[in-house]
Amino acid sequence: MVSMPVTSTCSQAKQVTVPGRVELLQQIDRSVAACSGNDGCFALLVFNLQKFREINVEYGHAAGDVVLAVVAERMQGELRSGDSLFHIGNDEFAVLLTQLKTPQVVQLAIMKLQEAIGENMEVAGNVLLITALAGAALFPDHSDDRDGLMKAADAALHYAGENNLPFLVYGSSIRSAEKQFADLRGHLKRALNNSDLKLHYQPQVDLQHGTLSGCEALARWEHATHGWIPPDVFIPVAEKSELIDTLTYWSINAALREWFQFCGSCSSASIAINLSAKLLRSPEVVDLVRRAMNIWGAEPASMVLEVTESAMMTDPRASLHTLSALHEMGIILSIDDFGTGYSSLAYLKKLPVSELKIDKSFVQHMADNPQDRKIVQSVIDLSHNLDLRVVAEGIESQQILDMLIGMGCDYGQGYYIGKPMPIGEMPPWVKGSNWHLPGYVSV
Ligand code: C2E
Ligand code: CA
Ligand code: CA
C-alpha cells in the first residue's frame, strides 16, 4: 500500500498527514539497525478499526475519510516524541514505540490509544463509536527482523479478534495456535491431494408445493487419526491459506458431477454450493465456475451459489463485481446466514441476488421464542417485497415446518426434513420421503 495522507476538512479533524506502509517498513529497518544488540528495544503495534467498511457503506466514503482523519489525530495526540504513527491499510494503523524500558509499557500504550480512538465522534450529523483491535510484537523478543515482526504483530491482532479480546501482545499461546493452524493446513493439503474430502447433500424442499427443490452440497472430512473435522474448522483454514481455491474448484466439480449423475433428469431441481468469502473477492472464480459448468453440461439456473452476508460485506465493491458476473451467467445467487451479519437495505437492493436464507439460529427455536418468530416473519416479508425467494434453514420439527408453511416461506431445509447425506443415500431417501421430486427417474 502506498503512503496515504489521511486528511479531512471536517471541523473535528485537523489536517493530519500520516506516512504509510512503505515508510513503516523503512522505519522498522532503521530501528532494527539502531537497536541490534539491545533487549526490548522497540515495539510494533497494529490497530484495525472495527466495522470501518460498514461505515463507508452506510455513511459514504467522505464520512469514512473523516473517521480516519479523526482517528489519526487522536492517536498522534497520545504518542511520545520518538514514537511514530503510520496508516498502513484502509482501516489499519501502526505505531512504532521506541526506547522501551519495560514490555509492560506496550500494554499501557495500547490501552491509552484505544481509549482515545474510542471516544464518541460526530461525523456527518451522526454520533459514531469507533473501536480498534490491536496486536503488538516486540523487537527482538518476538522477531529480530522486519518481516517476522510484522507477521507477529498481525498474528497477535488476528488472535485478539478470534478470541474477542481488545488486544494481544505476541507470545507463546499465539505461537502454539499458529503451529496448530500450520499442522491443520498441512493435513488439509494432503487430504485435498488424496481426494479424502467428500460432499454430503442436504435436501431443500418447496414448502408451498410439497416437492424436493434441490440439495445443498456440504463438505465433509474424515481424518485418519483425528476423525471427523467439521467444515466450520477446516473451511476457515482453507480460506486463510491458498487452499481455498483448490477446495472450491474441487467442491464445484464434485457437486455438479455427483448431482447430475443422481438427478440429470430433474430439470427443476437445483444444486446449492457454498462460495467462500475470499473467493468472492477474486475475479478468477467466475472462470472457475464457467469451466465446471461446461465440463458437466450444467444449466446455469440449476446452480445456486450461497454466499454469506458477512462475506459480501467484507469487500462490498469487489463482491458486487463478482456477483454481477455470476448473475449475468444465469446462476442463482443466495445470501446465506441472513440476519447474522450487517447489511443495509440500501446495499441489499443493489445486489443481484435471488434468494435469502434465514439463518438457522432464528428458525431452530421459533416455536418457543416469539422474538425469533417475528424476525423470521419480517425476513419472509422483506424477501417477498424485494422479489426474492426465501429459504428457512434449521427446521428441526413438524411444528416449525407447519409454522413456516403458514408464514408463507418458500423453501425449507433442516434435520427434520433430511440430514446431509452421501449422494448414494439420496435415491432411497427420495423413494421413502413424502417430498416428490418432479422428473426424477429412479435407477
Ligand atoms: P451453512 O452453509 O450455513 O450450512 C448449513 C449448516 O447447518 C450445515 O452444517 C448443516 O449440516 C447444518 N444444518 C442443516 N440443517 C440443520 C438443522 O436442522 N439443525 C442444525 N443444528 N444444523 C443444521 P455443516 O455441514 O457443519 O457446515 C457448516 C458450514 O461450513 C456451512 O454453513 C458453510 O458455511 C461451511 N461449508 C460447508 N461446506 C462447505 C463448502 O464446500 N465450501 C464452503 N466454502 N463452505 C462450506
Ligand atoms: Ca450454505
Ligand atoms: Ca446457513
Image: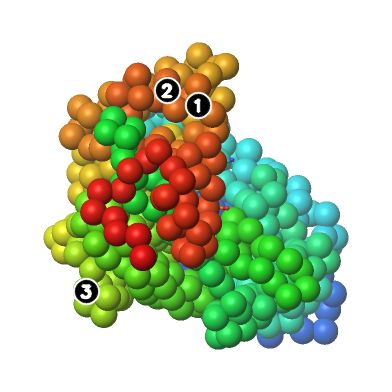
Q: Are marks 2 and 1 in contact (CB under 8 Å)?
A: yes
Instruction: Report if the beta carbon of the residue with label 1 is closer than 8 angstroms to ligand 1.
Output: no
Residue 29 visible, this angle: no
Give coordinates of residue 316: x percent, y percent. 32, 52
Q: Residues within 10 Å of mark 1 (few under 14, many from 20)?
A: few
Q: Residue furthest top?
A: 370
Q: Is residue 157 left or right of residue 326?
A: right
The numbered disc on residue 179 is: none
Residue 327 screen position, x and y as percent: 19, 57
Density class for disc 3 (Cα within 10 Å; few <14, some 14-19, many ≥20) is: few
Which quadrant of the structure image shows residue 33? bottom right
Q: Amino acid at mark 2?
A: Asp
Q: Quadrant of the N terminus?
A: bottom left
Q: Which residue is mark 3?
A: 297
Determine which residue is flagged by label 2: 402
Q: Residue at x 85, y 74 (%)?
A: 39
Disc 1 element: helix
**Mark 2–mark 3 distance (CA, rounded to whole Å):** 37 Å
Asked if residue 168 can be seen in this view, the reply is yes
Q: Residue at x 31, y 48 (%)?
A: 437
| Residue carrying label 1 | 398
Label 3 sits on what residue type? Gly
In which quarter of the view is residue 25 placed?
A: bottom right
Compared to residue 342, the image places residue 257 above or below, namely below
